[in-house]
Amino acid sequence: MTREEKIDAMLAKQEIHDTLMRYGRGVDRADGDLLKSCYHEDAIEEHGSTYVGPAMAYIEGAVGRIAKMGTMAHYICNVSIDLQGTRAYVESYVLTFARFAKDGTPYDTFTGGRLVDRFENRDGVWKIAHRKMAFDWNHDIASSETWCLGMFKPGDPKMVMGRKDKNDLSYARF
């Protein structure tokens, strides 16, 4: 592999990695535009037993539900990228936290899985063309939020709390 080919591969892998990070942020902030920027217009999403079909339709349906849900966080960890010309086969480990209510009781659910993607480079841009989720484990427990045993105080005006909209701190430029 020539130096130029190595640089091209490095740049492709960085663009793919940036797209994965944008996806995690888009989900956690319920930002439909940011999520859509990760997928080609005709991409397919296979999200476990909850959805199989066009990714854009999945995003349009999910963003409203996500915005109304409790706290959630997606952590994208190990990323393996196999470049094959204008395609890349990508496996990304993902850890998720989400708060759900069941019969009025809040539960924290932790899930480990993998985003298994086929990225395609179209017109010089790497985006997801097809995604399948692999679910590896899950743990649900009754919520017990005490903010580090009372060290942090969510009601304090100095405390910045995360939001699922464009008023989240991550959109501010200070």
Image (cartoon, helix red, strand yellow):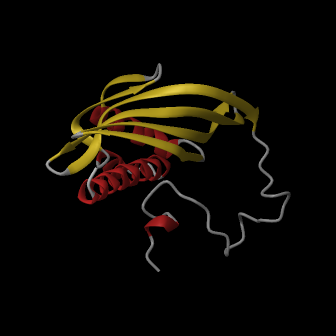
Q: Nearer the viewer, residue 17 or 9?
A: 9
Residue 3 image position (x, y, % from top left):
28, 59
Q: How many marks?
A: 0
Report the residue at 46% width, 34% height from top.
115
Q: Is residue 110 above or below residue 158?
A: above
Residue 79 image position (x, y, % from top left):
48, 44
Left or right: where 76 falls relative to 87: right
Report the residue at 51% width, 67% height from top.
169
Left or right: where 171 falls relative to 54: right
Q: Is residue 156 above or below residue 69?
A: below
Q: Is residue 99 above or below residue 13?
A: above
Direction front: furthest residue: 2
Direction top: furthest residue: 49
Report the residue at 37% width, 34% height from top.
117
Direction right: furthest residue: 149
Left or right: where 12 falls relative to 164: left
Residue 37 image position (x, y, % from top left):
29, 49
Q: Nearer the viewer, residue 64 or 23?
A: 23
Q: Is residue 29 above or below residue 117?
A: below
Residue 93 image position (x, y, % from top left):
53, 38
Direction left: furthest residue: 123
Q: Residue 106's image quarter? A: top right
